């Protein structure tokens, strides 16, 4: 029998064995959940996590620099990876059924039925019904048809409190948890749960130490043993503890790392345990482990900025991390560099070196704008605002002391289409006949407020469902607040209980309003009925002339006063309408985020033609940027437009900029001047892709030759050849400067 035949015959057996193991685990977790149905949620969760963590952490591999590879199972407890709260991936479990024997398949089918009403997701649905917030779409359907608003179910964007974790280590966490045993009922229950899950983490470290010994990875073994009984003493210890605790807790981002890791690095260098080359190898090993999580939208490592306690040591770690970033050249970690006054100016040069080498990191954040903006948006003092970190696709949270999950999506371009046809919330279904742009504007704002009202209540329902079903014990341990207060993450523990909402199509809607005001109401080149007919016909046939007319109107991204004014007017209106709903949702803040993954492309597939001249099914514009190819006045004009929207009324907006390699050849003066001018004008951040149109086109034609090519999609990066075809076209359509 040849090798091919052997693999063919062995594969089904391997799949069946894996399915049997996964099913047995799922049945065990289901039984634990059932058995603890009447117990306090913290005790039930602790019992589940004791069984779950050994499944989450994967074996070491020869050559690893750190331990902590993770894969979240089909059933368990998690803030986001794997599922939401107490979760079961019922579709994933159903896929196991054909590979099981009849007995196990029957038992698993019963478990699947049990989780239909036992999950945190189900609890969220009940809460949404109770809050009468059903004007929105359905989460699992938004990728297949158009919705104006869609709720999401996750607790995303949490960042670990690295200063406390590094200072206390596991022993300090145990002592702080044990102190609550004499507290009130909730605190005492949390204390028992926290102590139980810390023992489970200790067992993970013990297991890794033994495994590392067997593989000859003595440095990993020594670090894991040390961390069981003491706080981190070296940079390796710090990175190892951060990776194990975030992996156990289901946190996908690391927050600000330089001010915490810098002193450990300095101690290592002073003691001769590491030189800068060895430190770079260690950080690179950590980065590679982060990249293997393949979370796509996450893996944020924040460097630099104002408010650091150890700026000199932090800068030294930044230098090491940026050199590792240049060598990494992967889609994760999402290294982000905050630019502040008290840091080494050479860090910007290292950042530009990374970008010139074809990396899409680091992303650049302007603290001179962002700290005052966060102060206003979150209504906090400047010192608290200085702790801001971007996560995921670019949303801001207040370091480790806030939660700010985006639990809603708003497609403002689709909502405008509904308004034009009289089918939006607040309208009567009749075709509107406005006399001026003011009537259309008021109807759009009314519809937006109604959709936002429901999304705010969905955000609240998501948080409430967590408290109904679990306590997120491990996230509560590693962020700032819960362990001090003796309360769970969302039960009064986190210091800032916020939320965010993602908006898409803002540029398209603003450009459409610019065009409608000029073409329909000012110049009267077509009527509203003719406009609606042209949109319905996708600007084809006799309606093509109207489409061409709309496309010729001023567009955002060209520093044009009319187009930029409409963009800022719509931006401000939607941002402020979102902010005003925070009290109704029981939140300290609820803020819009104008960021992007590739939802602009997914939403675009099911969004009708828009009055900016965009065709049906085409991608929506990317975040706070012009529509693809609509900017004609050069990069200075693009950045001038992008600096105009008020950054102090939302929780983050992303700007993508495609520059040709010529900007980075030889003298860096022009690119530095471009960035300095943008930041001085009020620009908050920029994400740069260095590429040329020929290479992108070649990658579409011969993907096998261009697997190395990285691009900015939105708030995250991807290998260009891995993206869906329409997303590739959207990136290709962006103007290359």
Image: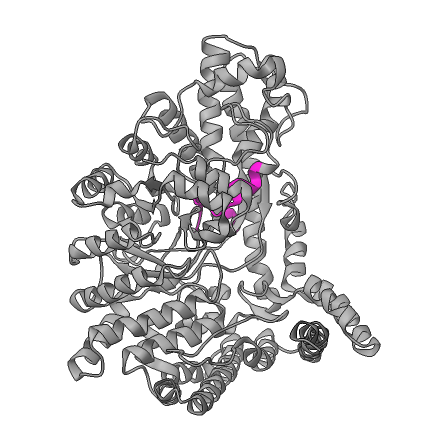
Side of 700 relative to 35 (left or right)? left
List x then y, in percent, for residue 8: 70, 71
Residue in front for this viewpoint, 375 or 356: 356
User: Exactly how many numbered labels are in the figure?
Assistant: 0
What residue appears at the point 49 percent right and 15 percent down from the top-left corner? 549
In the picture, the quarter occupied by the N terminus is: bottom right
Q: In which quadrant of the rendered view does residue 227 lie? A: bottom left
Answer above or below: position of 515 versus 102. above
What residue appears at the point 36 percent right and 21 percent down from the top-left corner? 562
List x then y, in percent, for residue 444: 53, 28
List x then y, in percent, for residue 405: 48, 55
In the picture, the quarter occupied by the C terminus is: top left
Q: In which quadrant of the rendered view does residue 94 lie? A: bottom right
Residue sitting at the far right: 102
Instruction: State which region is magenta.
Output: 583-604
- Magenta run includes residue 585: yes
Answer above or below: position of 51 versus 627. below
What residue appears at the point 48 percent right and 13 percent down from the top-left corner? 519
Side of 38 relative to 291 (left or right)? right
Residue sitting at the far top: 524
Does residue 547 appear anywhere in the picture? yes
Residue sitting at the far front: 2
Residue in front for this viewpoint, 423 or 316: 316
- Magenta run includes residue 84: no
List x then y, in percent, for residue 551: 47, 21
Q: How is the image coloured?
A: one colour
Does residue 622 appear anywhere in the picture? no
């Amino acid at each position: 029998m040849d090798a091919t035949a052997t693999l063919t015959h062995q594969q089904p057996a391997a799949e069946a064995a894996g399915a049997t193991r996964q099913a047995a685990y799922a049945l065990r977790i289901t039984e634990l959940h059932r058995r603890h149905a009447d117990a306090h949620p913290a005790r039930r969760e602790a019992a589940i996590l004791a069984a779950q963590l050994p499944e989450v952490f994967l074996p070491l591999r020869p050559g690893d620099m750190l331990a902590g590879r993770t894969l979240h199972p089909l059933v368990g407890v998690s803030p986001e990876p794997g599922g939401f709260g107490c979760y079961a991936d019922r579709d994933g479990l159903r896929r196991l059924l054909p590979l099981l024997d009849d007995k196990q398949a029957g038992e698993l089918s019963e478990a699947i039925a049990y989780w239909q009403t036992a999950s945190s997701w189900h609890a969220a649905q009940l809460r949404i019904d109770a809050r009468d917030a059903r004007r929105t779409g359905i989460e699992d359907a938004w990728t297949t048809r158009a919705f104006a608003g869609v709720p999401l179910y996750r607790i995303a964007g949490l960042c670990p409190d690295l200063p406390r974790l590094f200072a206390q280590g596991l022993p300090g966490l145990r002592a702080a948890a044990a102190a609550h045993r004499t507290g009130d009922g909730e605190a005492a229950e949390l204390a028992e749960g926290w102590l139980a899950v810390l023992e489970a983490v200790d067992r993970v470290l013990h297991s890794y130490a033994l495994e590392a010994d067997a593989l000859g990875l003595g440095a990993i073994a020594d670090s894991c043993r040390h961390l069981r009984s003491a706080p981190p003493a070296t940079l390796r210890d710090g990175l190892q503890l951060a990776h194990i605790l975030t992996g156990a807790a289901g946190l996908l981002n690391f927050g600000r790392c330089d001010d915490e890791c810098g002193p450990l690095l300095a101690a290592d260098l002073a003691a001769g345990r590491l030189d800068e080359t060895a430190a770079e190898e260690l950080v690179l090993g950590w980065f590679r482990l982060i990249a293997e999580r393949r979370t796509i939208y996450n893996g944020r490592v924040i460097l630099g900025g104002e408010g650091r306690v150890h700026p000199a040591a932090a800068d030294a770690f930044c230098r090491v991390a940026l050199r590792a970033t240049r060598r990494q050249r992967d889609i994760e970690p999402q290294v982000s560099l905050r630019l502040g006054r008290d840091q080494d100016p050479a860090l910007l040069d290292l950042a530009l070196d990374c970008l010139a080498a074809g990396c899409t990191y680091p992303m650049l954040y302007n603290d001179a704008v962002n700290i005052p903006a966060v102060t206003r948006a979150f209504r906090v003092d400047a010192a608290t605002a200085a702790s801001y970190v971007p996560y995921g696709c670019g949303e801001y949270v207040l370091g480790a002391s806030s939660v700010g999950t985006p639990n809603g999506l708003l497609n403002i371009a689709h909502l405008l289409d509904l308004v034009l046809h009289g089918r939006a919330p607040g309208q009567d279904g009749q075709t509107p006949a406005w006399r001026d742009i003011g009537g259309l504007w008021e109807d759009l704002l009314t519809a937006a407020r109604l959709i936002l009202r429901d999304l705010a209540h969905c955000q609240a329902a998501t948080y409430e469902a967590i408290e109904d079903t679990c306590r997120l014990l491990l996230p509560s341990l590693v962020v700032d607040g819960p362990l001090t207060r003796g309360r769970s993450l969302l039960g009064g523990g986190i210091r800032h209980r916020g939320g965010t909402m993602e908006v898409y199509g803002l540029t398209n809607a603003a450009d459409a309003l610019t065009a409608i005001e000029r073409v329909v109401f000012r110049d009267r080149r077509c009527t509203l009925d003719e406009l609606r007919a042209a949109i319905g016909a996708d600007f084809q046939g006799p309606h093509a002339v109207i489409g061409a007319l709309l496309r010729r109107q001023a567009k955002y991204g060209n520093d044009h006063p009319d187009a930029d004014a409409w963009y800022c007017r719509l931006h401000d209106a939607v941002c402020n309408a979102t902010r005003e709903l925070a009290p109704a949702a029981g939140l300290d803040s609820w803020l819009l985020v104008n960021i992007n993954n590739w939802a602009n492309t997914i939403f675009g597939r099911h969004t009708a033609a828009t009055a900016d001249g965009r065709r049906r099914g085409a991608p929506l514009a990317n975040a706070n940027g012009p529509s693809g190819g609509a900017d004609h006045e050069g990069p200075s004009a693009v950045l001038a437009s992008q600096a105009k929207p008020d950054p102090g009324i939302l929780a983050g907006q992303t700007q993508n900029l495609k520059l040709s390699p010529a900007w980075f050849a030889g003298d860096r003066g022009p690119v530095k001047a471009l960035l300095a001018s943008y930041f001085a004008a009020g620009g908050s951040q920029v994400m740069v892709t260095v590429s040329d149109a020929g290479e992108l086109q070649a990658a579409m034609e011969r993907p096998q030759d261009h697997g190395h090519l990285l691009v900015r999609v939105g708030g995250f990066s991807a290998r260009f050849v891995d993206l869906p075809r329409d997303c590739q076209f959207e990136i290709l359509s962006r103007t290359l400067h």
